Amino acid sequence: MSDTAAVVEAVHEALSHVNDPEIRRPITELGMVDAVEADGGRLRVKILLTIAACPLRDTLQNDVREAALGVEGVESVEVEFGVMTEEQRKDLQVKLRGPGQAAEPVIPFNLPQSRTRVFAVASGKGGVGKSSITVNLAAALSQKGLSVGVVDADIYGHSVPRMLGVEGAPTQVEDMIMPPQAHGMKVISIGMFTPGNTAVVWRGPMLHRALQQFLADVYWGDLDVLLLDLPPGTGDIAISVAQLLPTAELVVVTTPQQAAAEVAERAGAIVTQTHQKLAGVVENMSWMELPDGSHIEPFGSGGGKTVAEALTRDVGAEVPLLGQVPLDTRLREGGDAGVPLVLSDPDAEASRAIRAVADQLALRKVSLAGKQLGLTPTS
């Protein structure tokens, strides 16, 4: 083998460790490396993008250049970009979904081999901080090394993109949607498809279809955890989640006052009709720390415990109070800035409380009932 051929082979090997920033799989495996040419120490690499306006083009260029420069004998790297043909994009779609699912997308979280834990974060009423809890839980789970996805299922009141600082738009590859990423998490929201702050004025069937597309048409990859931020109450989306994701577990968010607790109990009791599981209750805004270190309870106390006990009676199984999160203005500030508090100030009391909830969710056992274990009986 000539020196040039050896360098080209070594570069291909180096590029096999470069992942596409959106799909998170090696670019060599995805057929994105179109050409590698060496002329002495000078290298030319041509990469095929799924679409010309790839939002993470610069990231990919830097990753390819860095990997190639790490090969002995390479002194300079020129990265060129092309665009996949329609046939190449279809081949990519088959590689990602598999030949049996390319034409008819299915919800991957319902497949027997799926090991993704799905948690739907619900509340009885608005204003209890459900979305803040969702994005901070997602960030805490991601910090534990888990692969996390977030679905903003609050179609009318979508807020997750702002709260996670998502600026990019989804990329479409044939019939698949590549979700933007923020803080290492994949995120999808109707807010990414509507211009500006346009109101979404849809009836039930359109809401159901939007949620179905978020789950089936979006390429999520191999997630450990999927979190859905549900709208308040027990309306169309809550029913659609039960139909589309029957194995999803509900996390009910409430505040301490009894009026909110009563409404939250109704939101959790929907599982008696949908036959879903309840993961537990999170009490938000439980207390507030004053400058002198003392605590006050501006919204009363006991609401979370009341909801957990009531739901335990309703469903006939223990529904735990997963945690109590104190009122902290930095939770709101982090949401406005697009950086969850558990990331910006992990030592804050609210951050520690949310991480404790994440620890409990991360340890929940996944049932093997109905799962295909891939075992073959021996004679």
Image (cartoon, rainbow, N blue to C red):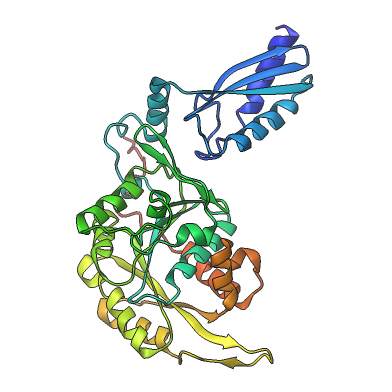
Q: Is residue 111 visible?
A: no
Q: Judge whether residue 339 can be spotted in this image.
A: yes
- Which residue: 54% across, 66% down? 335
Q: Quadrant of residue 338?
A: bottom right
Note whether 198 is above or below 66 in the view shown.
Answer: below
Residue at x 56%, y 72% (from the top left corner):
331
Name which residue lies at 46% across and 60% down: 160
Can you name the residue that lies furthest to the top here? 2
Which residue is rendered at x = 50% and y = 82% of the image? 285
Residue 317 coordinates in the image, percent (x, y):
31, 76
- Comparing 78 with 197, the one in front is 197
User: How many badges with numbers are in the image?
Assistant: 0
Q: In this orientation, which residue lies closer to the viewer: 290 or 139?
A: 290
Question: Up-down: is 344 above or below 101?
Answer: below
The one of 261 and 361 positioned closer to us in this rendering: 261
Residue 231 at x, y percent in the picture: 34, 66
Up the image or down, 379 lies above or below 6; here it is: below
Which quadrant: the C terminus?
top left
- In which quadrant will I find the N terminus? top right
Q: Quadrant of residue 37?
A: top right
Across and down, in percent, residue 192 comes to: 42, 50
Would residue 175 appear left or right of 137 to someone viewing this image?
A: left
Residue 332: give x, y in percent of width and height.
54, 72
